[in-house]
Amino acid sequence: MTNTITLYHGTTNEAAEQILKCGYIQSPAYFTPKEENAHDYGGYVFEIDIDIEKINVDTESYNSDDVQEALEDGASFFINERVMI
């Protein structure tokens, strides 16, 4: 059984059309645990349940690689593979 977490991916409406057409978000894909933060990246937000083992803290925008701490703070995460929607 996988341990999943709900994360959000914000993007432009134009990019969202392409994502919906192909069925996945291209890697590297960036996410946030806070839906309101995802809206900063565009007018369309995807809500995705992701295996927690696949997420990486974006240490360029957050000063720790502790996943639990970063989740609580609403940090940005990335995944190095396609993410199916």
Image (cartoon, helix red, strand yellow):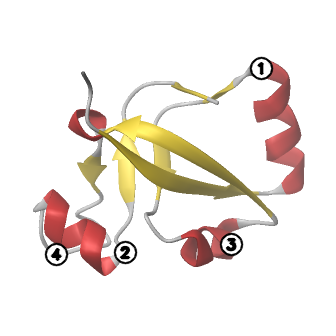
User: Disc 4, disc 1: CB below 8 Å?
Assistant: no
Q: Position of residue 57 (x, y in %)?
A: 25, 56
Residue at the spot of label 1: 22
Tell me the element at label 4: loop
Please tell me which residue is depicted at 48% across the width and 40% down the height of the picture.
Answer: 49
Up-down: is 6 above or below 63? above
Cα gap from disc 4 to disc 3, whole angstroms: 22 Å
Location of the N terminus by quadrant is: top left
- Look at the numbered disc 1 and give the secondary structure of its residue: helix
Asked if the residue at tag 4 contacts the one at tag 2, i.e. Cβ–Cβ closer than 8 Å, the answer is no
Q: Which mark is residue 74?
A: 2
- Residue on which disc 4 sits: 63
Position of the C terminus by quadrant: top right
Distance from label 3 to label 1 (Cα)? 22 Å
Left or right: residue 30 compared with residue 59 = right
CA neighbours of label 1 inside 10 A, class few (<14), some (14 to 19), many (20+): few
Q: For numbered disc 3, what is the local secondary structure? A: helix
Q: CA distance from mark 1 to mark 2?
A: 28 Å
Q: Which one is in front in this view, the residue at disc 2 or the one at disc 4?
A: 2
Badge 2 density bin: few <14, some 14–19, many ≥20, Cα 10 Å: some
| Earlier sequence position, callout 2 versus callout 4 | 4
**In this rendering, position of residue 85 left or right of residue 54:** right
Which residue is identified by label 3?
A: 39
In percent of width and height, residue 5 lies at 37, 48
> Label 2's element?
loop
Position of 49 relative to 59 (above/below) = above
Residue depicted at 12% across the width and 69% down the height: 64
Q: Is disc 4 in contact with disc 3, using a CB cutoff of under 8 Å?
A: no
Which residue is located at x 55 percent, y 43 percent? Answer: 48
| Kind of residue sitting beneath label 4 | Asn
